[in-house]
Image: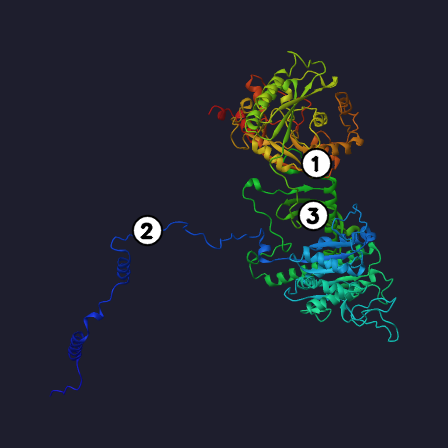
Amino acid sequence: MRRPVTALNRNHYFVIGLLLGLLLSWHIPQDIWEEECPEEAAENLLIERFGQEFEPHLNLINKPLAAKKPVKNVIRPRYYSSELGIREKLFIGVMTSQEHINTFATAFNRTTAHLVNKIKFFIYADSVKTNYKLKNIVGFTDTRESRRPFHVIKYIADNYLDEYDYFLLVPDTVYVDARKLVKLLYHMSITFDLYMGGARIGLDPPGGSASVDGQSNEPPANEEQAPGASDRNYCSLEAGILLSSSVIRKMRNNLERCVRIGSTSDHSVNIGRCVKYASRVAGCQESFQGMRQFSYALDAPGRRHREFSELAKEEAFRNASTVYPVQTPEDFYRLHAYYSKHHLEKVQERGYALEQKSYRIANGSISNKILEIRWPLGMPPPSAPETRHDILTWQLLNGTHSFLPNGNAEHALAPLTRIEAQDFAKVLEIALQYAALKHPRLSYHSLHSAYRKFDATRGMDYQLHLNLQEGSGRSRRLVVKSFEVVKPLGRVEVVPSPYVTESTRIAILVPAFEHQVPDALLFVEQYERICMQNQDNTFLLLIFMYRLDSPSKGDEDPFKALKTLALDLSSKYKTDGSRIAWVSIRLPEQLSDPVDPQGWLLHASMYGPRQLLSLVVADLALPKLGLESLVLLATPGMIFKADFLNRVRMNTIQGFQVYAPIGFQMYPCRWAQFCRECDTCDVSQSSGYFDRHNHDVIAFYSRDYVQARKLLHPQGLPIIRSDLDIDQLMLQPGEETRPPGVESILDMFVAAQHSVHILRGVEPNLRFGQNVRNHLARGGTLPQSVPDSCGREQCIHLASRKQIGDAIIRYEDKSILHK
């Protein structure tokens, strides 16, 4: 049965749509679709106006046009802190007087300056002296007392407003516990106005004293009050006023009004009125954001004439960040000692609590590699050596000597220096104190043995083995207990040094004996190649040391070849400003004996056994140079590069530092047959060694040398002013009165205890031993035995221990020899 069709299917929809489309296309007019293109319309419009032959032309005059507002380059500040607005925390301004500069102000500076970011002292400048030891002094010419705090505010706002967060104004009779105050400031937000200090309610009666710490001493109603007595709730300047940078900025913007309303002679009232008017702060804030600054008044009733040891027992004294008024400069140092001790005890308590907490957390259940709990707590572990050559060895000690010092076998035994002996005695004392607490029934008998090891990343480690006595009488017996003591490294700081450049002119001094003329000729040729041809800013001064009977003129002059070469090179490079000069020294009779060149070459020093002659060379040559010259004392047998001269310029600082490089001594490979000669190769253990006992090459400024020589002149080291004075310095053994251990210029700087530092460091671009190689190349030889005057340290090494050991084994084992 068919179902009736009740709806349209798809075909019906298609047919209906087609019919509707045909009907619409038939009735819609044709011109509705014929619209003209905009481009064609514009072209037709141009043809109607200008004709059929119109051609467009581009106008390129004054095009492209420059931007009306040129783009500015963004100039960024030098430091991130300036760009991010990061400021230092605290600035202290001290109001003092000229009479108190060398007393109260100096004591304030010594106890506080090293703990805060900046400190300035403000005085009147009506008759300012210039010989004050303090350098951070600011003077005001306006001597009106009521204007003084406003001058301070203006100076701070003009110079330091954008560099510090908080400013503390105090008189010079206030001791400031800077550690506690800075810690307090780090817990407060800088986004709010701060006017903090000891609250002062009203003014004191005439002849009375200020009341601080919230206690009011109101004058009786029937007494006459000073101007401003109706003012309330101001911070007392006698205890110190703490202001934020935002308050200082508002005070500067309203400074004229502050000067008019601050007409009293009380600085606390004048500052308080200005703060209230400028910043709308209600009054002195004794607490802010839960933090409170405490002040301690020494002149309060019941506190006068009491010792600091009694006051230190009070909780108010220990919590105070300012103490006032201090009566004498010595009280500053006493207060600083008490508060420093208090802070040290707090640090030790926190460290002990942290250590115990760490041990409780570990509890033996977690691996120490994960927790990294070490002893002492917070110290890095001993450094792990990368190779066997980097192993740090323990050094055996007793109370007076060290065994195998410096980690080598050159000396089996050496006495402890004074500082080492004091250090060891202090370590032993600490170990005995700990032993008495740990083992109260045992008493100290003697030192069994001790070891020490220095680790540059950790500090000095000691291992002490003590003989402790147990019992008494016949039942007495010795027990060995071991203790470990560590002296950790303190805070590592970069030593500030003056600014230096690589453009300083170097005066190179090269002394030469008569038998060293061939080496000096080669040195001058090397100097021409490295310095004169490259126009390096240097000057060469040759020092000729004649024997007593040697001629100094004519063809028989032993230094004639050197003089001729110096004159030729000076004229050749005259336009470049490079020249070579010389100075002649006539040695006394005792130093004019003939010299064996072969035996002389075995000495590490070019002066042989007469190293004191380096002082003679410097004394007689420096007057030719001047006091401001940078001097490099060299040797004719050394090889150097231009980088070495730049390092001399950077490491030698006038009035600050002397540079004594440790050169690389090359082995005489051609004569010893243990190695191969290579002048261009890098330094290696098989080709030579760094000779720390050779002090011939040293760089210094003339003024520093003269000052050091003057310090030792009264001690028996006379200054040589002419050739006739050399005998006074070169006395026979047993006759000299000079300071012990002074054999060279480096020893002279050490013995003088001059204020300049002495920098020693290995220098791979400075090499010794070329004179020995030149002597062997000319057909010479070396003696078979070491001269008597050449000790173990003053004599050059022919090869390394490994090379000599291999040679001995090959010589003894003939089977190896024939292989």
Q: Locate residue 629, reporting x and y percent.
A: 67, 32
Q: Is residue 602 left or right of residue 728?
A: left
**Of callouts 2 and 1, which one flags the residue occurring earlier in the amino acid sequence?**
2
Which residue corresponds to the image point at 55% horizontal and 33% vertical from the top-left? 685
Q: Amino acid at mark 2?
A: His
Q: Locate residue 551, reporting x and y percent.
A: 69, 13
Instruction: Kindly state the secondary structure of the residue where label 1 is placed.
Output: strand
Q: How many other residues sit within 10 Å of disc 3, few (<14), some (14-19) or many (≥20)?
A: some
Q: Which mark is in front, 1 or 3?
A: 1
In contact (CB < 8 Å): disc 1 and disc 3: no
Q: Which mark is in front, 2 or 1?
A: 2
Coloring applied to the structure: rainbow
In contact (CB < 8 Å): disc 2 and disc 1: no
Q: Locate residue 233, reporting x and y percent.
A: 76, 71
- On screen, 127 above or below 177? above
Instruction: Name the residue that disc number 3 marks.
Output: 465
Q: Quadrant of the N terminus?
A: bottom left
Q: CA distance from mark 3 to mark 2?
A: 104 Å
- On screen, 431 above or below 634? below
Instruction: Kindly state the secondary structure of the residue where label 3 is placed.
Output: strand
Instruction: Name the residue that disc number 1 marks.
Output: 414
Q: Locate residue 696, reporting x and y percent.
A: 66, 29
Which residue corresponds to the image point at 80% horizontal and 49% vertical from the top-left? 128
Q: Is residue 51 left or right of residue 529?
A: left
Q: Of residues 585 and 571, which is closer to you in this image?
A: 571
Instruction: Name the residue that disc number 2 marks.
Output: 57
Q: Is residue 591 visible?
A: yes
**Of callouts 1 and 3, which one flags the residue occurring earlier in the amino acid sequence?**
1
Instruction: Kindly state the secondary structure of the residue where label 2 is placed.
Output: loop
Q: Is residue 294 visible?
A: no
Q: Of residues 28 and 144, which is closer to you in this image?
A: 28
